Amino acid sequence: MNTVDYDLVIIGGGPAGLTAGIYASRARLNVLMLEKLVPGGQIIVTDWIENYPGFPKGLPGADLVEKFIEQAKGFGLKIETGEVVSLDLSGPVKKIALEKTTITARAVVIATGASPKKLGADKEENFLGRGISTCATCDAPFFKDGVVAAVGGGDTAVQESLYLTKFVKKVYLIHRRDQLRAARILQERAFSNNRIEFIWNSVVTGFDGLFNLEKVSVQNVKTGETQQLDVEGCFVWVGIQPNTRLVGNALKLDDAGFIAVNARMETSAPGVFAAGDVRSTPLRQVATAVGDGAIAATSAAHYIESL
Amino acid sequence: MSKAKEVNDSNFEAEVLKSDKPVLVDFWAPWCGPCKAIAPAIDELAAEYGGQIKITKCNVDENSATPGKYGIKAIPTLLFFKGGDLVDQLRGLVAKNKIDESLKKLL
């Protein structure tokens, strides 16, 4: 058999990648986890996770990540910071090109997650970090007693808007439909919170301000009417897009661009597995990502044994 | 290992604006997950650049004048100063090598 640097390389260090790392290192595979920024993924910016079992009072996302990392390191998982530049997944030896070096592995778990979508509204780029944010836990205190907008209608948008109300005097929650998609318990909390004003059937078309954000332009999609809201901040939670740039056409994707897998987390390429938010799945939660990671690592171990 | 030095509203002028070396200021707060996440990289860079660039951090929870002056509305925000002038900035969670690139430009 050809020599390789690792049995398994896991790309991405969120809950799916870290769990795959825990299972793979506990199975005594020679495994490396690569993370381009810092381990944790999207939950680093989640203020409170209350539906992950084992923590009945809930906990900050950053604290949960710390526990995952501690557990993974306890089994000896090797974690390196590095951005993957390109991937060759076609042969029995997978090639993972980093900026300065290329490493080889028999199997790969892709756990690159997903990123928040942008609105595509006018001047959005100008005000990123100058009022536009996707991290309420980081940035809400800068808008203390102020007025902000939030965009979206899913779990994240509603939960984080509720968090914002601890700081600001008003949140305009702008949603393109006439009802929320968020879990019922979150909807109930939002409807009973008098600091949240809903702006239904509406989309954000543009941003304005001298230096920092001052105004958000909103258009009603039913009537076509537009209005400007005076806000200091705008928090954008309109869904996610899969981080699949590296994969290109090498793997089968679903219609929305997420990686297609079977129940064993096997992708269309032998020896390549996908786990967590990057894969085609009906639910994207910490609880589902860790399940994916466990299955992907176990499937990878079986695959490596069978070679 | 040398770590990033804490600066505040009262010593910002002396430590940053009047520094004879270029300065990086990491605006952070204890409530901010991404800030915690990049803190180890900032400390590592403080050790690596020891004598050449002053690496500092400013807690926005305890200091409001300085972040206000620079219009900071999001953290982590990294500001890079040379000769008292703001010459570069990075906003949000960024990789260590991106910070390193910006630091190299200060030398």
Image: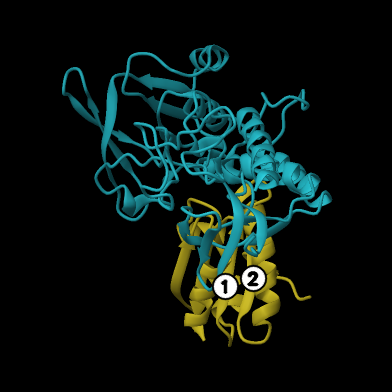
Kind of residue indicated by mark 2: Thr
Residue at the spot 61% in from the left edge and 57% down from the top edge: A105
Disc 1: which chain? B
A175 relative to B54 in the view: left or right = left
The image position of residue A259, as x and y in percent, is: 45, 37
Quadrant for the N terminus of chain A, please.
Answer: bottom right
Q: Could you say which chain is coloured cyan in the image?
A: A
Disc 1 is placed on an element classified as: strand
Of A124 and B100, the residue lying toward us: B100
In the displayed structure, would residue B61 be above or below residue A99?
above
Kind of residue indicated by mark 1: Leu
Q: Quadrant of residue A45?
A: top right
Q: Answer yes or no: is residue A2 visible.
A: yes
The image position of residue A215, as x and y in percent, is: 30, 40
Q: Check if mark 2 and mark 1 are on a common chain.
A: yes
The residue indicated by pointer 1 is B24
